[in-house]
Image (tube, rainbow, N blue to C red):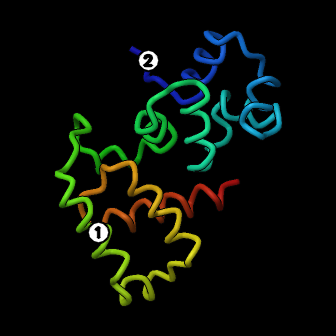
Amino acid sequence: MKKETLGQVLKQRRGAYAYTQRELARKLGVKASHIAYLENGRRRPSLSLLSRIAETLELDKQRLFLLAHPEAQWILGERGESAPARQQKDSWRKFATDRGTLTRNKVTAQELKVLKNVNLLGRVSAPKQFLFILNAIRQAVEEE
């Protein structure tokens, strides 16, 4: 069985809505070529674009995030089971207030804002996981 990709999901859902790449791009505020790159697996969408895609195409944000960043699967566990809400909140608080870790890893204010949005997905259960996500994002940005 072939593994599902972000591009396949986007293309299928876009087709279900009978949108052209140009129409979807206009709704999302990007160029049609960007939609083509996403569908062909040549680019990864930003977190804010992932959110807009999920809302526009009525898709699950967590599913899209995992398709865009499959390397983050281990954070969620095999079945994507959620950690208790309190543990998630504590993990974010511990990470965001750990000045030593933030300084050592040169976490910028903008990166902290992005990670705060990642935390809203509600699946990060340990402070160290934020560093993994940050490094994955940094790597994705360098590849673009």
Q: Which residue is found at the position 56% from the left and 49% from the top?
A: 47
Q: Which residue is found at the position 78% from the left and 17% from the top?
A: 20
Q: Position of residue 51 (x, y in %)?
A: 55, 41
* Residue type of the residue flagged with mark 2: Lys
Q: Position of residue 40 (x, y in %)?
A: 67, 28
- The residue to which callout 1 is attached is 127
Q: Nearer the viewer, residue 71 or 47?
A: 47
Q: Nearer the viewer, residue 63 or 56?
A: 56
> In the visual, does 128 lie left or right of 14?
left
Q: Quadrant of residue 18?
A: top right
Q: Quadrant of the N terminus?
A: top left
Give the answer, above or below, for where 43 lies relative to 2: below
Q: Say which element carries label 2.
A: loop
Q: Position of residue 64 (x, y in %)?
A: 48, 35
| Sequence order check, earlier mark of 2 and 1 | 2
Q: Say which element carries label 1.
A: helix
Whether the residues at callouts 2 and 1 have beta carbons within 8 Å, the answer is no
CA separation, marks 2 and 1?
33 Å
* Residue type of the residue flagged with mark 1: Pro
Q: Which residue is found at the position 78% from the left and 40% from the top?
A: 30
Q: Residues within 10 Å of mark 2 (few under 14, many from 20)?
A: few
> In the visual, does 60 lie left or right of 45?
left
Q: Position of residue 2 (x, y in %)?
A: 44, 17
Q: How many marks?
A: 2
- The residue to which callout 2 is attached is 2
